[in-house]
Image (cartoon, rainbow, N blue to C red):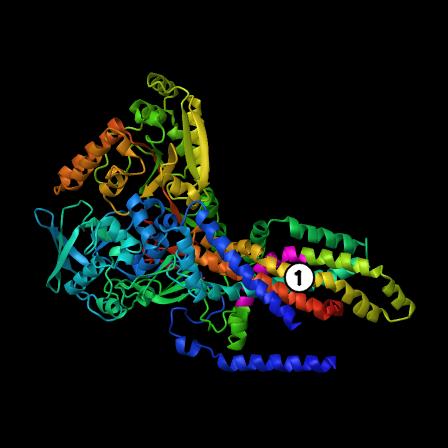
Amino acid sequence: MLRFIVRRLAQMVGVVFVLSLLLFLWLRLLPGGTVSAILGDRATPESRARLEKALGLDEPLWIQYWRYLKRALTGNFGASTGVLPGRDAFDIFLARFPATIELSIFAILIAVLLGIPMGYLAARRRASLFDNSSIIVSLIGVAVPVFFLAFLLQYIFAVKLGWLPVSGRQGNINATRVTGFFVLDGLLTREWDAAWDALKHLILPALTLSTIPFAVIFRITRASVLEVLDEDFVRTAESKGLTNRVIRGRHVLRNALLPVVTTIGLQVGGLLAGAILTESVFSFGGIGEALALAFEHRDYSVLQVLIMASAATFVLVNLIVDILYAVIDPRVRTR
Amino acid sequence: MKLTRLKTTAVLAASVSLGLAGCATSDRTTDSGSATGSGSSTASGGAGDTFTFGAAGAPEVFDPYYASDGETFRVTRQIFQGLLGIKPGTADPQPELAESWEPSEDGLTWTFKLRQGVKFTDGEAFNAAAVCYNFERMFDQNEVAQAGPAEYWAYTMLGFKGSETESLYKSCEAKDDSTAVINLTRYTSDFPVMLTLESFSMQSPKALKDGDANNVQKEGDGFKYPAYAMAPVGTGPYKLGKYDEANKTISLVRNDDFWGEKAKTANIVFKIIPDESTRRQELEAGSINAYDLPNPADWKGLEDAGNKVLVRPAFNILYMGLNPEKNSKLQDLKVRKAIYMALNRDQLVATQLPEGAKVATQFMPDTVAGYNSSLQPTKYDVEGAKALLKEAGAEGMTLQFAYPSEVSRPYMPNPQSIADALTADLEAVGIKVEVVTKPWNGGYLDGVDNGLFDAWLLGWTGDYNSANNFIGTFFGSDVNDFHTWKTDFGKTLSKELSDADGIVDEGKRTTAYEALNQKIMEEYLPGLAISHSPPALVVGKGVDGLTASPLTAEMFDTVTVAKS
């Protein structure tokens, strides 16, 4: 198991390195650039040349990349030029990472807590009203554009009903920051109002972000349970006279969960894509929103850090899933 | 067995949580006087003592000298003041930290009489020595700062201490506590009105010194600013409370030692909400009190809902740039005139631009001295345009016409709809239009700078009230976006503009600019002035006292928010 983990970690370093090169080249070959973004519509040929020289953007790409790599290896990823000008790009990542993690955890919790039971029940009551309506709900979850759903939820629950805030992570509260996870910070410092306020701010974006993972988890669970219900060992278990609870828990659900766990892992990694839109609409201040802003401003330093860190996270999450897989299914370990 | 393992995990988790909780203590007891207020559990819009503004973006730095964007200036404007202020609701200068100013006969020496009894928020006195310290600090920048962050100084004063380009600024003398004298290397009509720019704000010399404020360094592909840049010390009606970057809010608190009338609302909170639709929802939910640049299509709906849309007087120009180097047909004045005649701008203004927009007759709005009121808009004349094109041998000519996507500018709220209307006009006179669209910062601005398009849409919002800030910016050098070096008038025009800028007598200078505006529109026509659009901001119910500024230089110290 240890060798397996070490090998996968080494792969992760390789992936991040190759990605850094591709990303570096891709960003610099894109139309537009940092200089245009900084100077905007008042750029003159002289001011552009001056700024390009000052930032070293007039040098050959390989020199720029070599310099970048040397700096990055010492933990210096450069300063932001667009998201928060002057701030260290890695600090921006560290500051915004908790927001995205907090949002993703809540989103995936919603997706799992609704998706698995609903998928299981839908499979058990195949072709029932519950099954059909669940399928429709999951289809809507995949089909409705995220921004539309976000605006709809904002309008109903924030503007019309006034139950929840429209956007942001917390109201204008004098809250103490400890970990950067606002709900957790409120609990740790016993600032209950701050924790409650942060939680209220999480509900709508987490719900929006959870729709796609929910739909996928629901459908995989349903399909997987249906498949397992047909297996011989379930019939054997039934013929042995085992209780329904044991059959459902130990035989059906445990076997059906294998593909579901893999799916959850992939969905967690893929949440970042959804987070770009969700965080932007809800002004949530996480990595997704920062990515959108950094792209708009051609903020090379921030884009590089965020994309590479996200890729590393994606690989890491998949590694964890593989380990979990091994825990659930002993055959994986012995292979 | 399993239960034991579960228990162990639970005990471990509980211990970690308790450990963390032990380390984490609430800052509230020590921070109760901070800008973030009392710790109430809801957003503060409508709280009576707080005005919450929905900002579209995060400020760059709080040292306005190194900033160049509106979102930064909106915040720093409440904290800092300059020698010259801006008369509310206009673009005209008015006394602020200087009570009066007087030029020498040659316009090279300016004597400023300073307001007495003013203190920076760190307790330091504002006086002539502080003024000179500020100017010397702005003048003496390292190479890194000169290249980018000190953008507005480079733009207005041209050069720095020791730079190749000579600076307009020469020196500053503190004659006595209340008299500062600024010497220039040559006269420009931009001085002293340029001092209304936020970048020229007065900052505490002690804070600048202690914070090593000029120490800007290159850091990777960006710049690293000294700590002072985030801890500003000015003389304005507010001071910085807290910038909560994680929660994207900036809180300002009233400066109770302010020399003038104290701010009416104790706190200002800027809540950063990049998405315009979300800002609108926030306003409707009552969690912010105002936001900038509402979509013109929403103005009516916002007003119907009880909000006030404050329309700013238009201080901008939308133009169609023409590149005679890229398309040689455009070197012919007849072709340029024909294209101008083909554009139905009355209809464009009536259908595509917000209420209050005007057809432009020249490259500056009518509030700028030097505006020529006798000029009439070029008449929309399809047959006349066709005849002129025929005369020039350019019938059926091809024109590559570019407009930007993914952007909305105050002078151009919806580039696509404007471009669609203008394209239809051009096609109606037989011009074959090749429409090109590129993202604003994904090839469009670069394309304009690098001369990739025959014709394109762009505009300008004035920085301050000066003719040179408009037509001087566009054509003051023949190396410009309009590629006037390819025309026979490019050099003459830039010389004429430079001469007009150097006329010290205000009356004569105004006459010279009026004449130049006429020449630009009738004899040269380097580009086509299209329209002036009024941008707006919106305030929610119960908000009073906000005066819209054509320069987007709104002051919030006069704002009151009704208690909800």
Q: Position of residue B556 (x, y in %)?
A: 33, 57
Q: Position of residue B495 (x, y in %)?
A: 18, 36
Query: Which chain is indicated by disc 1?
Result: A
Is A256 positioned to the left or the right of B333 in the image?
A: right
Q: Quadrant of the N terminus of chain B?
A: bottom right
**Residue type, label 1:** Ile
Q: Is residue B404 magenta?
A: no
The boundaries of the magenta stretch are A198-214
Q: Quadrant of residue B200?
A: bottom left
Most foreground residue, B183 or A166 = B183
Whether residue A166 is visible: no
Q: How many marks?
A: 1
- Look at the numbered disc 1 and give the secondary structure of its residue: helix
- The residue singled out by tag 1 in the image is A264
Is B511 positioned to the left or the right of A121 in the image?
A: left
Whether residue B410 is visible: yes
Q: Position of residue B237 (x, y in %)?
A: 29, 63
Q: Quadrant of residue B217?
A: bottom left
Q: Residue at x 40, y 75 (%)?
A: B32
Is B80 positioned to the left or the right of A24 in the image?
A: left
Most foreground residue, A254 or A1 = A1
The single residue placed furthest to the left in the displayed view is B105
Q: Quadrant of the C terminus of chain B?
A: bottom left
- Residues packed near mark 1 inside 10 Å, few (<14), some (14 to 19) or many (20 plus): many
Is B112 positioned to the left or the right of A274 in the image?
A: left
Main secondary-structure element of the magenta-colored stretch: helix
Q: Residue at x 44, y 29 (%)?
A: B423
Q: Is residue A203 magenta?
A: yes
Most foreground residue, A300 or B378 = A300
Q: Quadrant of residue A268?
A: bottom right
- Rendered view: B235 above or below A38: below
Q: Position of residue B384 (x, y in %)?
A: 35, 19
